[in-house]
């Protein structure tokens, strides 16, 4: 079966089930999708791990620890699939500077390294517990929306992995909302929390990519994307705006 016939098969909703029947260009896009997810989960876990002991109580520290643990587990699940395509998973997971960050005032969309596929939002440092909770709420909503999309990818083992991962990531956003609500109820806290929301909002929004993308068309042809960046971002904006409203904050 040549690549064009596979594209036609995928365009009609077909799925692939093993590395052996995956054409090179499809493989490259699939590996990029997986690497972005794995790098983002590992970088996110590393950043949040540094914040655990700043939690104001045992309950908050347990929640943060659970988030870190589950993000590492989610990364491992997808990394195993990358290993089936020949990725050196041990070296991959252990030789990246997952805690590395840019300066806080680096421009939106800035990246550190072409070898690190994390979403750019994970290149910015957290500033304390409250800032981490605000970021986790906004990014948690974004990840939940992206995972709905990823759960439909045409590579069946990966789609199944993402479907298994999705409930945990949704719970992370719920924990963040609970934490932010508690923080917002404290006297004089809303101004600094709103400042964190204002900081993280454009950086999370940027993680959805540009409105027009030739690559998006390729991904759609391969069955690796269904919704446009614009549609996904709009969905996130609505859900994030609603969540912020529930805790007395607002989108910038």
Image (cartoon, rainbow, N blue to C red):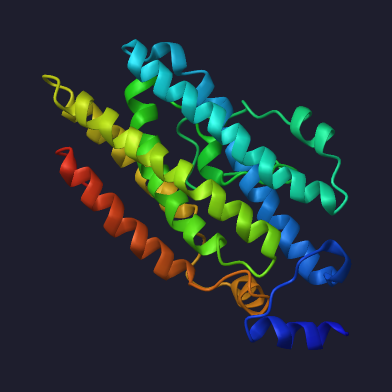
Count every numbered label the image shows and give the total.
Answer: 0
The answer to whether residue 213 is above or below residue 193 is below
- Front residue of this view, candidates 133 and 68: 68
Image-quadrant location for residue 191: top left
Residue sitting at 22 percent across and 24 percent down?
Answer: 183
Q: Please tell me which residue is depicted at 36% across the width and 57% down the height of the picture.
A: 236
* Left or right position of 152 against 15: left
Question: Splitting the image into 4 quarters, where does residue 178 fall?
Answer: top left
Q: Is residue 158 above or below residue 120?
A: below
Residue 7 picture location, percent across and down: 74, 83
Residue 251 appears in the picture as rendered: no
Q: What is the quadrant of the N terminus in the image?
A: bottom right
Q: In this rendering, would 90 be left or right of 49?
A: right
Can residue 31 be seen? Answer: yes
Quick one: which residue is furthest to the left in this view? Answer: 187
User: Which percent across, then down, holds residue 23?
Assistant: 84, 72
**Left or right for 206, reference 130:** right
Q: Position of residue 29 (x, y in %)?
A: 73, 64
Q: Name the residue located 40 percent from the left edge and 61 percent from the top edge.
A: 233
Q: Give the camera-side residue of 52 and 189.
A: 52
Q: Residue at x 70, y 28 (%)?
A: 97
Q: Where on the picture, by quarter, is residue 64?
A: top left
Q: Position of residue 79 (x, y in %)?
A: 73, 44
Residue placed most toward the observer, 147 or 142: 147
Height in image: 129 above or below 241?
above
């Amino acid at each position: 079966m040549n690549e064009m016939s596979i594209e036609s098969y995928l365009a009609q909703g077909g799925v692939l089930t093993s590395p052996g029947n995956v054409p090179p260009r499809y493989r490259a896009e699939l590996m990029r999708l997986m690497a972005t997810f794995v790098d983002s989960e590992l970088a996110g876990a590393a950043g949040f791990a540094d914040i655990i002991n700043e939690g104001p109580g045992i309950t908050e520290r347990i929640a943060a620890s659970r988030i870190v643990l589950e993000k590492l587990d989610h990364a491992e699940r997808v990394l195993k699939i990358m290993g089936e395509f020949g990725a050196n998973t041990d070296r991959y997971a252990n030789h990246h500077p997952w805690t590395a960050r840019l300066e806080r005032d680096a421009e939106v969309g800035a990246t550190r390294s072409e070898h690190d596929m994390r979403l750019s939002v994970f290149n910015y440092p957290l500033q304390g517990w409250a800032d981490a909770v605000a970021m986790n709420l906004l990014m948690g909503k974004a990840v939940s929306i992206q995972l709905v999309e990823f759960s439909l990818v045409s590579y069946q083992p990966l789609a199944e992995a993402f479907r298994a991962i999705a409930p945990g990531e949704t719970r992370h956003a719920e924990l963040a909302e609970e934490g932010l609500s508690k923080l917002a109820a404290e006297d004089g806290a809303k101004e600094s929390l709103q400042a964190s929301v204002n900081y993280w909002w454009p950086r999370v929004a940027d993680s959805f990519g540009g409105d027009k993308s030739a690559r998006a068309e390729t991904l759609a042809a391969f069955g690796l994307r269904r919704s446009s960046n614009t549609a996904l971002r709009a969905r996130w904006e609505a859900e994030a705006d609603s969540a912020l409203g529930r805790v007395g904050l607002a989108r910038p």
